[in-house]
Image: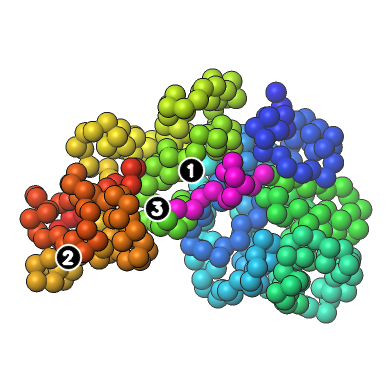
């Protein structure tokens, strides 16, 4: 099976500009391709995972990935899928975020010499002469066609600034620049990037009289069509200081039954035959597949040691064991106590298990909170230092969320 057929069999391919040409390119030739990353945060998150894994699959098939960091376009912000204009970042913030991205991609992408390319569009966008750029590039973009694109239509009612209108032109120019510098002939991105990718394909054809191609990937959504990667605590980050390896593991271990097969195909290197065997079951029998998914994904991002620790910790907890060594942990100090006690709801907020007291109150009233195995039934309950034997307490939220609290 060629790499194109593998991508298709896994359900990864959403749209492609010329399927026969792209299939031949990926299966029978070696090419440079690029995927863009918008550096609006200092960590990649689960939403980036599909594109990074696809980049890795294509690299393993012999192609050369270009990771393009949007140091220039990031100063504008992509309106695709957004209802409001993004906050504009400084050059220093963007440079910091780009460096964080590079480190997080390293476990999956081989950046050794000749194997992959890291580029930053700030290198060519920030020094452009605006009038020359419009004469040279802007003339190839139809405003009517741009306004018909889904990414712009979604913003028209709220107001689309001319500042953001430039994004598609800049992304198209990125593709042209990469084609000139590295003979990049394929852009890969999420399916929400389809209109932007088409702009670049057309620009290369107009300016260089050469063929270029685009391929979009299905977004990581659950069976209800909602984007995955969000929890009550917020986004699921690849940075272990933002989302601990244990929490990362637990996120995948607890996904819905209907999402296991899709996630195994999108986010692991397991052969399709093995995935089909794992998911050819229902109910509690799917727990094995969920554990395999959680372990494989955690290993890819955080390494074997952290994946082993997360799996062992989860098995101990759900098996009724007392091993809390690998559990997410917070520390509270003397200053957090008032007259020797701390309210249960205050503690939940302090360790970020709930965003507000109203949410904590609802949790308690629904019977979803326990401390050291003892259920808390009164929202006004307080904890004293005696509730922290040996200087620690285990908080359980709902059926599957555990958190250890240490006295500092």
Q: Which residue is drawn at the image coordinates 71% and 33% (left, top)? A: 8
Q: Which residue is drawn at the image coordinates 34% and 58% (left, top)? A: 362
Q: Which residue is drawn at the image coordinates 87% and 69% (left, top)? A: 143
**Percent x, y of residue 59:** 63, 38
The answer to which of marks 1 and 3 sits earlier in the sequence is 1
Q: Nearer the viewer, mark 1 or mark 2?
A: 2
Labelled pair 3, 2 in contact (Cβ < 8 Å):
no
Task: Establish if 221 lies above or below 278.
Answer: below
The answer to which of marks 1 and 2 sits earlier in the sequence is 1
The disc placed on residue 342 is 2
The prevailing secondary structure element of the residues shown in magenta is loop
Tell me if mark 1 has few (under 14), some (14-19) or many (20+) residues whose alpha carbon lies within 10 angstroms of its own: some
The answer to which of marks 3 and 2 sits earlier in the sequence is 3
Q: Which residues are magenta?
A: 218-231
**Percent x, y of residue 287:** 42, 29
Question: Tag 2's secondary structure?
Answer: strand
Q: CA distance from mark 1 to mark 3?
A: 17 Å
Q: Is residue 223 magenta?
A: yes
Instruction: Indicate the quadrant containing the C terminus: top left, top right, bottom left or bottom right.
Output: bottom left
Q: In the figure, residue 343 lies in which quadrant?
A: bottom left
Q: In the figure, residue 68 lies in which quadrant?
A: bottom right
Q: CA distance from mark 1 to mark 2?
A: 42 Å
Q: Is residue 155 left or right of residue 366?
A: right
Judge by depth and name the residue closer to the eye, 339 or 24.
339
């Amino acid at each position: 099976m060629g790499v194109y057929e593998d991508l298709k069999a896994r359900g990864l391919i959403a749209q492609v500009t010329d399927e026969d040409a792209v299939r031949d390119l990926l299966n029978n030739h070696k090419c440079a391709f690029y995927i863009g990353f918008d550096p609006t945060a200092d960590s990649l998150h689960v939403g980036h995972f599909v594109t990074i894994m696809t980049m890795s699959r294509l690299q393993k098939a012999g192609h050369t990935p270009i990771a393009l960091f949007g140091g220039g376009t990031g100063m504008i912000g992509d309106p695709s899928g957004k209802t409001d204009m993004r906050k504009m970042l400084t050059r220093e913030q963007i440079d910091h975020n780009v460096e964080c991205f590079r480190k997080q991609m390293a476990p999956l992408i081989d950046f050794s010499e000749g194997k992959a390319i890291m580029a930053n569009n700030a290198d060519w966008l920030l020094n452009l002469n605006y009038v020359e750029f419009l004469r040279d590039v802007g003339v190839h973009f139809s405003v009517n066609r741009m306004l018909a694109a889904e990414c712009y239509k979604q913003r028209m009612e709220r107001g689309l600034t001319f500042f953001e209108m430039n994004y598609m032109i800049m992304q198209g120019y990125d593709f042209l620049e990469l084609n000139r510098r590295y003979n990049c002939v394929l852009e890969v991105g999420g399916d929400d990037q389809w209109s932007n990718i088409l702009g670049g394909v057309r620009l290369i054809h107009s300016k260089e009289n050469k063929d270029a191609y685009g391929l979009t990937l299905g977004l990581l959504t659950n069976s209800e069509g909602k984007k995955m990667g969000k929890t009550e605590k917020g986004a699921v980050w690849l940075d272990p200081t933002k989302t601990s390896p244990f929490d990362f593991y637990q996120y995948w271990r607890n996904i819905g039954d209907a999402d296991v097969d899709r996630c195994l195909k999108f986010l692991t290197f397991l052969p399709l035959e093995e995935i089909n065997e794992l998911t050819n079951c229902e109910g509690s029998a799917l727990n094995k597949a969920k554990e395999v998914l959680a372990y494989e994904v955690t290993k890819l991002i955080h390494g074997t040691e952290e994946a082993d620790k997360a799996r062992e910790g989860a098995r101990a907890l759900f098996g009724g064991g007392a091993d809390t060594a690998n559990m997410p942990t917070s520390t509270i100090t003397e200053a957090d106590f008032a007259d020797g006690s701390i309210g249960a709801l205050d503690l939940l907020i302090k360790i970020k298990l709930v965003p507000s007291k109203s949410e904590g109150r609802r949790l308690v009233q629904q019977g979803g909170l326990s401390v050291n195995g003892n259920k808390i039934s009164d929202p006004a309950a307080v904890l004293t230092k005696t509730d922290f034997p040996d200087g620690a307490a285990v908080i359980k939220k709902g059926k599957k969320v555990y958190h250890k609290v240490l006295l500092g």
